[in-house]
């Protein structure tokens, strides 16, 4: 499954549309006005399917991920000098990013490919292409990419 993650151009709060290969909206993401980031995720029918919430007062940026209001894990930015590294406590996954923090590769604890996310350059808003071979992982992968993007936005 291929997803296109695109931030809306004129939006006061974080707001994104997630499209599939045919250009249909699969998910909509809406930010809430709170301390720290809080992003709600809705499916194509407008049903709330998950959210991520930034944990405040931590040494490193941390986001908790929820699917249907059930905690599925968290993602924490690790301190590194060269390549971005995130500690993911979701399904035993591991994530590695490139030096520019544009491309990310997610694998499971055995090294099996879970997903790739690529930031698309030369766009007015944050835009990523996400390749997820197993459609059952799409929501969790989307939340991981949203957390990485939210962490990067806070530094910019």
Image (tube, rainbow, N blue to C red):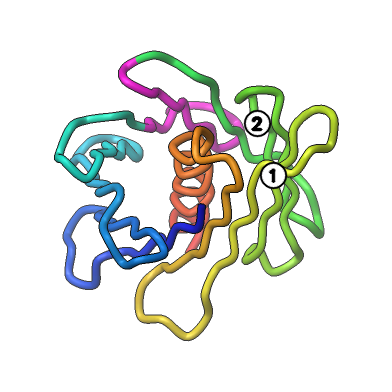
- Horizontal and vertical percent for residue 8? 25, 66
Residue at the image position 58 percent from the left and 32 percent from the top: 75
- Give the distance between the C-alpha atoms of the residues marked 1 and 2, in whole angstroms: 10 Å
- Horizontal and vertical percent for residue 112? 79, 38
Residue at the image position 26 percent from the left and 36 percent from the top: 40
Q: Earlier in the sequence, mark 1 or mark 2?
A: 2
- Horizontal and vertical percent for residue 155? 51, 57
- Horizontal and vertical percent for residue 143? 45, 39
Quadrant for residue 31, please give it: top left
Does residue 108 sit above or below 138 in this rendering?
A: above
Q: Secondary structure at mark 2?
A: strand
Residue 57 included in the magenta stretch of the image: yes
Magenta residues span 52-69
Pointers 1 and 2 in contact (CB under 8 A)? Answer: yes
Quadrant for residue 50, please give it: top left
**Label 2 Cα neighbours within 10 Å, binned few <14 / some 14-19 / many ≥20:** many
Judging depth in this view, the residue of 123 and 134 nearest the camera is 134
Q: Mark number for residue 106?
A: 1
Furthest toward the top, the residue is: 70
Residue at the image position 78 percent from the left and 57 percent from the top: 83
Judging depth in this view, the residue of 69 and 132 nearest the camera is 132
Does residue 32 sit above or below 28 in this rendering?
A: above
Quadrant for residue 153, please give it: bottom left
**Label 1 Cα neighbours within 10 Å, binned few <14 / some 14-19 / many ≥20:** many
Q: How many marks?
A: 2
- 67 left or right of 97? left
Residue 43 included in the magenta stretch of the image: no
Question: Which residue is disc 2 drawn over?
Answer: 88
Judging depth in this view, the residue of 127 and 37 nearest the camera is 127
- 13 left or right of 61? left
Front of the two marks 1 and 2? 1
- 75 left or right of 27? right
């Amino acid at each position: 499954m291929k997803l296109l993650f695109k931030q809306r151009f004129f939006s006061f709060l974080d707001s994104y549309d997630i499209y599939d290969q045919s250009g249909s909206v699969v998910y909509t993401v809406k930010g809430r006005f709170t301390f720290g980031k809080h992003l709600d995720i809705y499916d194509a029918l407008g049903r709330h399917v998950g959210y991520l919430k930034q944990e405040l007062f931590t040494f490193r940026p941390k986001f908790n991920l929820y699917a249907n209001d059930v905690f599925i894990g968290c993602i924490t930015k690790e301190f590194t000098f060269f390549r971005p590294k995130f500690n993911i406590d979701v399904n035993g996954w591991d994530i590695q990013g490139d030096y520019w923090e544009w491309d990310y590769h997610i694998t499971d604890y055995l090294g099996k490919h879970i997903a790739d996310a690529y930031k698309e350059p030369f766009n007015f808003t944050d835009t990523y292409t996400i390749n997820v071979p197993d459609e059952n992982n799409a929501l969790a992968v989307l939340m991981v990419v949203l957390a990485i993007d939210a962490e990067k936005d806070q530094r910019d």
